[in-house]
Structures are given as structure tokens and as C-alpha cells.
Amino acid sequence: MSIRIAATAMLAVIMGAFASGPARAETTINALFMSQAAYSEDNVRDMTADFMKANPGIKVNVEFVPYEGLRDKTLLAQGAGSGYDVVLFDVIWPAEFAGEKVLVDVTDRITPEMKAGVLPGAWTTVEYKSHRYGIPWILDTKYLYYNTEMLKKAGIATPPRTWDELLQQAKILKDKGIAASPIVWSWAQAEAVICDYTTLLAANGGKFLDDSGKPAFQSGGGLDALSYMVKSIDEGLTNPNSKEYLEEDVRRVFSSGQAAFALNWTYMYNLANDPKESKVAGNVGVVPAPGVAGKSQASAVNGSMGLGITTTSKNPDAAWKYIVFMTSRPVQEKFAKLSLPIWSASYDDPAVAKDQEQLVAAAKTSLALMFPRPTTPKYQELSTALQQAIQSALLKSVTPEAALSDAAKASGL
């Protein structure tokens, strides 16, 4: 009897081992995302849940950090030799990440269907020296948002087509007492201000670097861009607190009805039109960022981001499967309210445009114009120098000319 009991117990142990086998064999990957703009945290968690349901052998842990901490978090984890399998990276980082061997070169993994289906401009997000280090995931640029009710009260029939017209309309709104500070921007000393500056530089026909890779922003369109920023504050048309604002601050101010105009990313459109999030829902217009007469019809900055596999990942195949899922057309179209798809065919899908026709119409123009920030391994040094220079000029510590000249010298290029 005791022998049979022992045998039964042993059989239970063996069967239990077999039953737990698949659980022990489950692959776990860790993914790092940002906690602001574009897809929401809930969006990412829902996408990930859908992936795990379709791939029961793979578990994905997701982590979120503010954009300002994303690069450092990625590099610190890489230096430790472990941590993340999949990371979200900005369009400005492939040169640095390729040089530091942070990301796996996935050029050979890109299928013909991906090459043909993804918008050509989107691929520049993940490229460096003809190699691809991931798949574009967030396709984004900044648009000019405007309060339709305020413009109507001011007798303004159409939103501005040029940056000079923006100041003219803002002055009308201010003079009529409709908005004390009609324009709001994200000009804090952070990457956000570089994106706004890039938009203005592009509109003015400027460039960051010359053909030899040396700074060229301190004259021409680059100087015109900063001079415009300073002028808008001097004339009392820009909210003075813009010097401390990031994108979420811009959304908050515009959505509270304190501003008539705002430059911000795609995600703001649906949130500003959500009555739970905004006091101006239903009165939100959006158009491509303006141009400059004789130089450009519209302007746009490339603010896109990609998903890549880290070189320290122990499960690169599972990581790739996750990236392919997250960037796939069905997933992107399902979650197309805070970030628009990377797939060209999506823009002709009525389901994608539904309730955001104006945004999609603007995107068709803006996404074709996206101007890049400089592609250089020393981008971080250049950006830091420019951020400090712009802030100094906005605070009237130095002239725009002197500020940009100082930035060129401090950039290390």
C-alpha cells in the first residue's frame, strides 16, 4: 500500500513537472517606452496584451519613462549589459546608437512588403548610413492648432498660411481682448524647443549644417527663426510662460481656452476635442505649420520615433516579433487617434480618418515635408548648445546673433 502511495506521489511530481514545462519555457522580454505624447500608456498596454494573446509563449513587460529620461535610461541599461530587449528611440538617436552599438542592425529583416508599404519619409526615422536599426512606430510632426471660436469672434475667416500672418492674427485677437497671450509654444530648455525651432528654420529655408558638417544655423534661415521667436515674445503675442513649457503644458493651456494658437504634435488633436480633457472641445482646428512667403508653403519637423532591438537582448527573435506586431498596419489603424499610421494605404482608409478628417488632411501635407534635425553622433552636444542659446535669446540675455554664434562654437562640430 505504501509502495503504491509513493509511486502515485512520484507520478504526480513527474506530471507536475511536465505541466509546468511550458511556463518555464515562456520567453520574457522587456520593452521601454515614453510616458508622454503619441500613444498613451493605455494604448501601449492594450497593444501589448493583444500581442501576448496572439503569442502565448511570449511575455512582455512594459516600462514607461518621460521622454527626457528615455535616452539616458536606454544607455544606462545598455551599459549594465542587461535590461531591455526592445526600446523606443527618437529620430535623432540612430547615429549615436549605431556608433555605441546600442541597437541591432535589422536591415536584412525588413521585408519587401514593409519597404513598399511604409511611407518613404518614415524610414528616415530609423536609418543611419544606409542601415536600418528598427521599424518606425510613431510617425509625427507638429501642426498649428487654432481655436475656431476665437478666430470667428475676431472676424478672422481662415487660419494663417504664413508665420507673419500668425503674428498679424494674434495681434488682432490681443487688441480685441479675445486672448491676452494668443500663442503658446513648448520653449522650455529641452528637446521640445529644438523641435519648434526646427519647424521655423525649415520654413525660412535654413539649415543646421553645411556640406562639410559645420554649423550653418547662425545665419540665414536659422537666425531668422530665432529672431521670429524673440519678436513674438517682445510683441506680447506669445505666452511668456512658453519659455518653461513642454508639450503637455501647451496642451493644457490651449485646452483651457487661454490660447488661440498652439504648435504641438498629432496627439493633441483628439485630446483637445475630448470634453473630458478640454474646455474647447468642438472648437479645435488644425492645419500644417505655416510657411514663409517666397520660401515655403508650409513647414514640418520630423518628430518620429522607432522601435529597435538592443544588442544586449537575449531574445532578439521574440523582440523582433513584438516590434513587427506593434508596427503592423492593423494595430496602427486600430490605435490611430493619438498617433497616425506609418503605412501609406492607411490614409485612404475611411475608418482611420473618421472623426479626424481635418487632422488627416493636414497630415497628408505635413508628413511629406518633415525636416530633419541634424544626423550626427554629436547631436546631443549640438542640441544642448542650441537649447541654451535659444533660452538666452528668449530671456534677452544676448542677441539672437550672439546666441547662435555661441551655440555654433559650443556644439563641438
Image: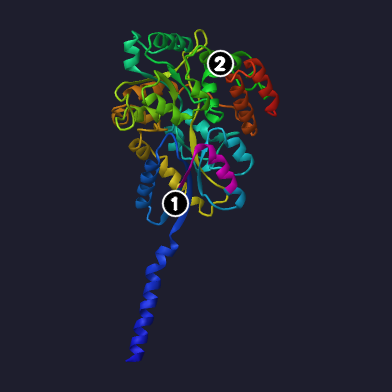
Q: Quadrant of residue 170?
A: top left
In this rendering, is residue 264 above or below 105? Answer: above
The C terminus is located in which quarter? Answer: top right
Identify the residue position indicated by label 2 in the image.
230
Dot 1: element? strand
In the rendered structure, the answer to whether residue 374 lies left or right of residue 250 reads right
Type of the residue with mark 2: Val
Q: Quadrant of the N terminus?
A: bottom left
Q: Relative to residue 338, is residue 152 depicted above or below? A: above
Q: Which residue was labeled with disc 1?
A: 61
Q: Position of residue 207 (x, y in %)?
A: 60, 19
Which portion, as a residue range, is magenta?
Answer: 63-76
Residue 144 image position (x, y, % from top left): 42, 20
Mark yes or no: residue 185 visible: yes
Within 10 Å of the Cα at label 1, are there few (<14), some (14-19), or many (20+) other Cα atoms? few
Foreground disc of the pair 2, 1: 2
Q: Is residue 40 magenta?
A: no
Label 2, label 1: how far apart the Cα atoms are: 45 Å
